[in-house]
Image: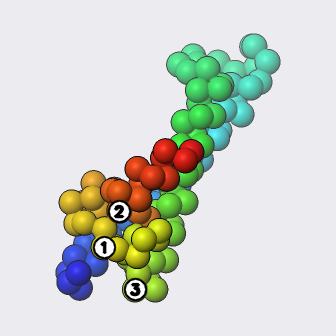
Amino acid sequence: MTKKELHRYRNQLLELRDRLTEAVQRMSETVRTDAQPAGEHDRHVSESPETELALEQDEETIRRQTVEALKRLDEGTFGVCQRCGGEIGLERLDAAPYTPYCVQCERQVEEVS
């Protein structure tokens, strides 16, 4: 992978990390607000607290994977599958730059989960 590509991925990951950090913080506040007894907040609730919590957990998982991908960039292992050691294709990294696995290993991990 070229230095230019690595720089592009670093910028994408930093932007994604910052955006997800803000989103998780907003969702956490929403979950706390929605958990208050009726009448203690004036907002209209668009999602159930359980849905909000599930969304928050999903966003936090991606945020954590993004931070880990930034570490792999620093270590020089970005783009290498953490399971098989093979190369993660650029098309996959373009779609999900935080991914730790190649497509084949991701399928195997999902089957086990």
Residue 97 lies in what quarter of the image?
bottom left
Q: Is residue 36 left or right of residue 99?
A: right
Q: Earlier in the sequence, mark 1 or mark 2?
A: 1
Give the number of the disc on residue 47.
none
Amino acid type indicated by mark 2? Cys
Task: Kindly identify the residue that appears in the image at 25 percent across and 72 percent down.
Answer: 8
Position of the N terminus, as image quadrant, is bottom left
Give the number of the disc on residue 87.
1
Q: Earlier in the sequence, mark 3 or mark 1?
A: 3
Q: Is residue 56 left or right of residue 35?
A: left
Residue 40 lies in what quarter of the image?
top right
Marks 3 and 2: CB-CB under 8 Å?
Answer: no
Amino acid type indicated by mark 3? Gly
Residue at image mark 3: 76
Residue at image mark 2: 102
> Would you place residue 96 above or below residue 81 in this image?
above
Q: Residues within 10 Å of mark 3 (few under 14, many from 20)?
A: few
Task: Name the secondary structure under disc 1.
Answer: loop
Amino acid type indicated by mark 1? Glu
Task: Kindly identify the residue that appears in the image at 28 percent across and 78 percent down.
Answer: 6
Task: Kindly identify the residue that appears in the image at 35 percent across and 57 percent down.
Answer: 104
Q: Is residue 26 shown to the viewer in this render? A: no
Q: Is residue 101 shown to the viewer in this render? A: yes
